[in-house]
Structure formats: C-alpha cells, structure tokens
Amino acid sequence: MDKPSFPDPRKMRSSSYAKRNDFYQRYDVLLSNWYLLTNRVQREIESIRQDLHHELAQWQPHLPEPNWHAYAQRMDRIAPKTVFRSRTAQPTSIR
C-alpha cells in the first residue's frame, strides 16, 4: 500500500514566507518615497493596507493564508503610476 503524501511543513512555511516577503518589499519601496507620491497614489496604498489588515484580522489558523501574491500584484499596479512631486528626488526602484 502506498502511503499518502503530505506536504512538507517546512516547504509550506518557506513558500508562505517568500510570498509575504515579496509583498512587504514592494510595500516598503513605495513607503520609502511616501512624501513624493501624489495623494491619489497614497490613498491607493492605504486602501491596500486596510484590505490586508481587515483580511488578516479575520484570518483563523485553520483557514488558508491571505493571497499575498494578489496584494503584491496590486502594489505592482501602483508602482508605474507613481508620479513624484519633485523632479530632483530619485525614487527607489523595485528590484
């Protein structure tokens, strides 16, 4: 009889960590230039942060984690829209 295969918990944790880390790296880049962003872009970033905060507040350990990749993609969609108020300041690039 074949034994049922179970996913390795270490691989699952590292995969989850990588997804969270990807999101937070993108988030940090946008926050590092916060004062240079337009108000509209700032509101979009705050909206994403609030959505994630709300989802994490409702999360239970027996449920799957939030979709970190979706939040990272939302941050990616904002990055090209970043219109800086100052032409002399150099924005930090994503990767």
Image (tube, rainbow, N blue to C red):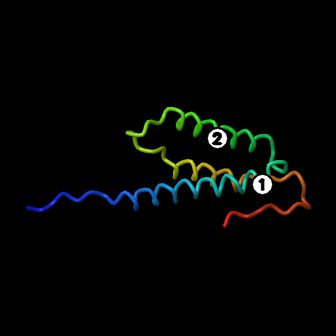
| Amino acid type, label 1 | Ser
Which residue does the numbered mark 2 point to in the structure image? 49
Is label 1 in a helix, a strand or a loop?
Answer: helix
What residue is shown with label 1?
A: 32
- 3D distance between C-alphas at marks 1 and 2: 15 Å
Q: Residue 8 has which mark?
A: none
**Residue 67 in picture, x, y percent from top left:** 48, 47
Q: Is residue 92 left or right of residue 77?
A: right
Q: How many marks?
A: 2
Task: Please provide percent x and percent y for residue 22.
Answer: 58, 58
Q: Is residue 5 above or below residue 66?
A: below
Q: Residue at x 72, y 57 (%)?
A: 29
Q: Would residue 92 appear left or right of 60 to someone viewing this image?
A: right
> Which residue type does callout 2 highlight?
Arg
Look at 58% across and 57% down and name the residue there: 21
Q: Quadrant of the C terminus?
A: bottom right
The earlier-in-sequence mark between 1 and 2 is 1
Asked if residue 86 lies left or right of residue 74, the reply is: right
Q: Quadrant of the N terminus?
A: bottom left
**Circle 2 — which element?**
helix
Give the class, few, some or many, for how many residues have Cα within 10 Å of label 2's Cα (few <14, many ≥20).
some
- Tell me where residue 54 appears, x and y as whole percent: 57, 33
Q: Residue at x 40, y 60 (%)?
A: 10
Residue 32 in the image: state x and y as whole percent: 77, 54
Q: Nearer the viewer, residue 38 or 30?
A: 30
Q: Residue at x 52, y 49 (%)?
A: 70
